[in-house]
Image: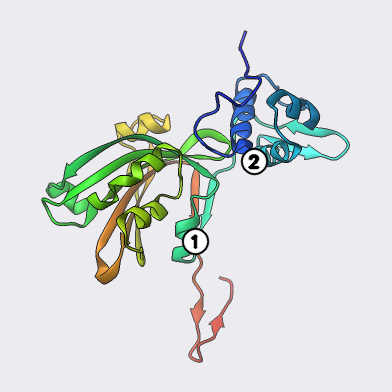
């Protein structure tokens, strides 16, 4: 018989308590403690079991709703709708600020790090000079409610940003805020290149999918003053777990915008 925690002391990292609670409940739903069509315990019971406030419970349940695991019904309660999340992570990117903030609501897990000297192959990927020294952080991201990782993320930073490791280990998800903080230079421009790929074996292990299944490779290049390359991220997304939306608007001759549908 499965043993279920009665508090959040075993929850990972320094994530907010509502995220920890959401992750625990999502795991218990996936393990069958709450069958599809059944009700989650009412708020007072969850508050008592996990020693948390009603606000924490409500935020945790809201995340479960966002994942498609449960739905709330007035006068009935919270109904379990699925054993695993069906919704994918959607990032609407219209500005550099949006790109910097898109990681909100996710949790980052640091898998390891290593120093590298760029050979010809890596230099081509990073758009840097051969022989340059980089620190690679091997990570993955999860939605706040837990579940499967949405991306295998390799982050390459300059040596001066080495001090960010401690915050990454603590679960800090806003990576490029850390690059600015520890690198001492503001990110002024980002370039994004998206392509299809067959997911390589290393990423497949992290993501829990079969090697060479369809995936998405998103390369992001972060630039500072005078176009200096500060960081590069290589993001491997499995099919069906993430989507990006971008909006373009046509400017008319007078400087206004033209909208329409096609």
Q: Quadrant of the N terminus?
A: top right
Marks 1 and 2, the one that precedes in the sequence: 2
Q: Position of residue 186 (x, y in %)?
A: 35, 64
Q: Position of residue 258 (x, y in %)?
A: 55, 81
The residue to which callout 1 is attached is 98
Could you say which is closer to the camera, residue 167 or residue 173? 167
Q: Position of residue 260 (x, y in %)?
A: 58, 75
Q: How many marks?
A: 2
Q: Quadrant of the C terminus?
A: bottom right
Examine the rendering and report whether any part of residue 5 can be seen.
yes
Using the numbered discs, state the Cα–Cα distance from disc 1 to disc 2 in whole angstroms: 21 Å
Above or below: residue 205 compared with residue 253 = above
Q: Please tell me which residue is depicted at 44% across the width and 64% down the height of the picture.
A: 96
Q: Please tell me which residue is depicted at 60% across the width and 20% down the height of the picture.
A: 31
Contact between labelled residues 2 and 1, with CB atoms less than 8 Å apart: no
Q: Please tell me which residue is depicted at 34% across the width and 41% down the height of the picture.
A: 165
Q: Does residue 11 appear to the left or right of 125 in the view shown?
A: right
């Amino acid at each position: 018989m499965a043993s279920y925690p009665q508090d959040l002391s075993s929850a990972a990292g320094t994530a907010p308590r509502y995220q920890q609670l959401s992750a625990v409940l999502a795991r218990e739903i996936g393990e069958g403690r709450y069958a599809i069509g059944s009700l989650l315990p009412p708020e007072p019971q969850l508050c008592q079991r996990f020693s948390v406030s009603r606000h924490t419970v409500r935020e945790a349940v809201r995340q479960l709703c966002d994942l498609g695991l449960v739905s709330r019904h007035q006068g009935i309660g919270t109904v379990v709708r699925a054993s695993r999340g069906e919704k994918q992570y959607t990032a609407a990117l219209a500005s550099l600020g949006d790109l910097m903030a898109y990681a909100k609501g996710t949790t980052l897990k640091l898998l390891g790090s290593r120093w590298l000297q760029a050979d010809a192959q890596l230099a081509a990927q990073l758009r840097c000079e051969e022989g340059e020294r980089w620190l690679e952080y091997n990570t993955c991201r999860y939605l706040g409610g837990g579940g499967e990782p949405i991306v295998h993320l390799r982050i390459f930073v300059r040596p001066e940003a080495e001090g960010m490791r401690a915050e990454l280990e603590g679960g800090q998800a806003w990576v490029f805020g850390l690059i600015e903080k520890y690198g001492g230079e503001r990110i002024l421009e980002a370039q994004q290149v998206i392509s299809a790929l067959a997911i390589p074996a290393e990423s497949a292990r992290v993501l829990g999918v079969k090697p060479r299944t369809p995936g998405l490779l998103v390369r992001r290049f972060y630039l500072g003053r005078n176009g200096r390359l500060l960081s590069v991220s290589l993001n491997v997304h499995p099919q069906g777990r993430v989507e990006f939306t971008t909006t373009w608007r046509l400017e008319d001759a007078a400087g206004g915008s033209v909208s329409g549908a096609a």
